Amino acid sequence: MASYHRASVGNVPQVIDAMTHDQPRARQDDHASVPLRLLMVSSDTYPPTRVDVAVMFGVELAARGHRTDLILQSEATCPKSYVTAWGGGRVWVGATDLGSSLLSRIHKHIRGILADMKLFSWMRSGSYDIIIIKDKFLSGIMALLAATLFKKRCVYWLSYPFPESYMERARDGTARYPLLYLIRGRTFNLLLYKVLLPAADHVFVQSEQMRRDVAALGISAAKMTVVPMGVQAKMFPGAVNRAGRRMLPADVPCIVYLGTLARIRRLDFLLRVLLQVLQVKPAAKLYLVGRGDEPGDEQFLLEQARALGVEQALVLTGQLPQSEALQFVAEADVCVSPFRPTPVLNSTSPTKLIEYMAMGKAVVANDHPEQRSLIAASGAGLCVPYEEHGFAAAVLQLLDDRELAVQMGQRGRKYVLEHRSYRVIADKLEQELSQIAHGLYASNEQ
């Protein structure tokens, strides 16, 4: 596949991440007004729940007249693939196997690859401008081949360092099938950094740190654009004080964590923080809103809580509808966003932090690259080292000083609405995709 570089447009590949500091820029050309047809093959399942797909493409870009067709594997039991309408486009929903055995896992992945082969017939019959590969590896090779055969632009969207994560989970014992995870990680690492990213016309990444990490592996920073996580503003009405609580007890100091409970996140860190908080505020409670990736993830946290003697102060809500989960955030006294400092997690763009800020809540976060940048730019909370005593002290400071917590929450909400609303992000992404699709590249082979 021909590789491309941008012709005569300056440093445009690196503009989207600038929105974390700047107001939306005016369009530099008329191409953004031309409707695009996009085909995305993604590791997301149907229906898509990650906001960077569901909101960015299904709502914001669709509202601008752009059509996105998706190829996704079903989240629910689905013995046979089918087509359905979605976000102004359509989705090929692939069949799946939801069994928990190793054979079922392998069967599920095989069915996913077979479903992704639909992209060849759709590329043949559809007048697509760009094919987007999102977090796919084996199927990404097929998509790259299809883009070459049909002479279409090909973009890779890397939302998380999955190969590195698989290998880390194999090494630290958190993977259910360590050998399978190790093989998968090494294979996907080779495909991603030696084939997919070098061949893609452009690469979207989640954070500035991810761009640095990927560039260190030989991919030109000039062909990468940072598209951080954001929120759909209308879904985040704002904070609720203690008197208006419906989910949380009115007279109890409540700390809320929203997100995955996967063991790789090492949320036993928060349990040790809770232990120190309870020494000062014995009535305090910690709410973990979400679920793990594996059946034993929640059980691990419960066992750790019992060992520390904090099980009475811990509440696991399980997976909740978004509106209910956000209600817990809205009613919290303090929201927490711990990210264990590892190369895998350092490259992420934390959704939970943005959601806390959008709800007008004061945040305690540890010194993670993007969290550090967001807290510094917004004044939305306290950023401390990844250390239990300091983290607990920051939580206690905000529990004791409600006026400060309210002020921080207001600053965070204002910042997110101005800089991390998906309406703002989609304006930037629309322009970037239009530049990719409408001739602002020149082939290196010319």
Image (cartoon, helix red, strand yellow):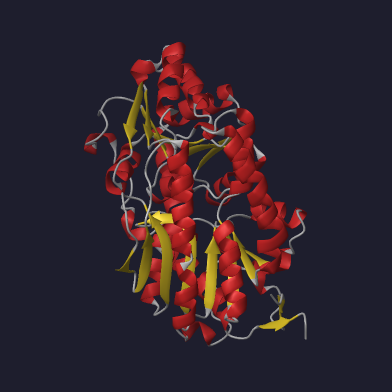
| x and y, in percent, of residue 405 in the image | 43, 38
Specify whether residue 226 is in view: no
Location of residue 200 in the rendering, given as x and y in whole percent from the top left corner: 65, 69
Name the residue at 23% across, 35% down.
243
- Note whether 365 is above or below 348 in the view shown: above
Q: Residue at x 64, y 31 (%)?
A: 171
- Indicate the quadrant containing the C terminus: top left, top right, bottom left or bottom right: bottom right
- Percent x, y of residue 301: 44, 24
- x and y percentages locating residue 261 in the rendered image: 44, 34
Q: Is residue 422 left or right of residue 367?
A: left
Q: Quadrant of the rendered structure where residue 99 is?
A: top left
Q: Nearer the viewer, residue 64 or 437?
A: 437
In the image, 259 versus 275, the foreground residue is 259
Quadrant, the N terminus: bottom right
The image quadrant of residue 423 is bottom left
Give the left or right position of residue 261, taking residue 385 as reference.
left
